[in-house]
Amino acid sequence: MAAALASTNMDDAVSAEAAVAACAAAFEGWSQTSPQDRVSVLENAALSLDSRRADLRQIAEAELGASASWIDFNVDIACDMLRLACPLAHDVGEIETRRDRKGVEHHVRRDPVGVVLGIAPWNAPVTLAVRAVAAPLACGNTVVLKASELCPQTHALVVEALQDAGLPDGALEAVLTRPEETEAAVRTLIADPSVRRISFTGSTRVGRKVAGIAAEHVKPCLLELSGNAPLIVLDDADLDRAADAAAFSAFFNQGQICMSTERIIVTEPVADAFVVKLVERTRSLTERHERGDSAWLGRLIDANAALRLTGLIDDARTWGAKLLIGGQSDGTWMAPAVIDRVSSAMRIYHEEIFGPIAAVLRVADEDEAIAIANDSELGLSAAVFSRDGARAARVAQQLETGMCHINGPTVHDDASMPFGGMKASGYGRFGGKAALDEFTELRWIADHSKVELSLGI
């Protein structure tokens, strides 16, 4: 069956209400489906999504300028998400039973909550759409996916792939909106009494609005928001490994990933040598792009993004930073840039870059590296490079981020692990067992039937 999509020519508030009504009507049947049957549907969904890989590449390139390698990366992770959500189906229902010394029987249950609203962004269009629906469906909920207005057809194809895997009518609905109508549609969706949980992935600015609306209706909200990932290079690091990871994490998909490396914090003893290696890798990426043998970098979402990034570079140079390579833009493509000697006086130090700019900050030692890394309102992903595993682990434990990678890139995902941020990067966790807390209701049912009541009256 094709995805039930709200037409962009319809009144979006009415379309939103219709989508929720369909999910509410389907909830009882889907929630009572056996865990084995839900697992079968999710496994089929992974196969169905993978079979549409070529179409997803084509549509996402047209809508977003996304590279084929980025969409393949998305599809691979999304298929893992669907498969790794399967065990959650078996964790719903009664999870604990015991009798206390008085004879009261206590039953602890995890039950589906009802309709879940997932709001997905454009930048990782396949991965993040699937993440919004996989765990909720596995837990027996029905889901309304609020598709991004910037990639409606990509998200429509994702929903179609999942529905064609055997989901019953109404288990998964999608709502599409024009940009100017999105806020009204989201307010309508959150306010609907049948919507019991909200997950949102996107910017901190919009996430604050979504959380505020959810709070008005006393509804739990899972937020995965902006990042400003630090990558720390200590004086005993493998510099080649660090430079490879920094280039990958800063430039893949034009740096338009919430986990993208934005601040490279390098201790002075190795800073010059590291910067030379990073510039070499950056130059190689640009040359490959110009030869036409690599679309790995992708394109920016629009020309305004390039203007914003150019403004960040110009501001940094005004305050003394050195642009070592890149930064030229051509419409929606920007040459990957390395900008050295960034300081707290510059906008680029504080703002989420969300573009192909590697900002290098030089620090005296490990302690200053930790302090600079934590000097941000955001805290999503981070990385630490050191040949001393214990030292790297000690630094990782002091970083105020929801995720940290030792001797690896800041851009990394594993659908079995708890994914989320700290501080203004959001709260709650996608992935693995952590998703149970987000998409089920934990209930205690006590049976006093076999106990003589003594109420003192």
Image: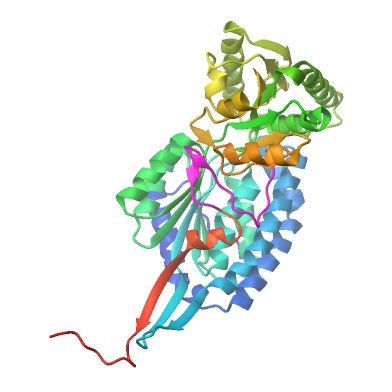
Q: In screen coordinates, is 153 left or right of 288?
A: left
**Seen from this angle, which residue lies furthest left?**
457
Q: Where is residue 291? Give x, y as percent.
A: 87, 24
Protein image colouring? rainbow
Q: Residue at x 72, y 44 (%)?
A: 71
Relative to 304, residue 408 above or below: below
Look at the image and tell me in which quarter the N terminus lies: bottom right
Q: In screen coordinates, is 121 left or right of 388?
A: left
Q: Where is residue 73? Give x, y as percent.
A: 74, 46
Look at the image and tell me in which quarter the C terminus lies: bottom left
Based on the picture, tell me whether residue 422 belongs to the magenta stretch: yes
Relative to 320, residue 369 above or below: below
Q: Residue at x 60, y 41 (%)?
A: 397
The answer, for residue 332, to whether it is visible in the render is no
The answer, for residue 207, to whether it is visible in the render is yes
Residue closest to the eye, 247 or 406: 406
Q: Main secondary structure of the magenta part?
A: loop
Q: Residue at x 70, y 52 (%)?
A: 77
Relative to 267, residue 227 above or below: below
Q: Where is residue 265? Give x, y as percent.
A: 66, 25
Residue closest to the eye, 304 or 383: 383
Q: In screen coordinates, is 396 left or right of 24?
A: right
Q: Which residues are magenta?
A: 411-429
Relative to 83, residue 444 above or below: below
Q: Residue at x 39, y 40 (%)?
A: 209
Q: Quadrant of residue 326?
A: top right
Q: Where is residue 152? Give x, y as percent.
A: 57, 45
Based on the picture, tell me whether residue 318 belongs to the magenta stretch: no
Residue closest to the eye, 58 or 122: 122
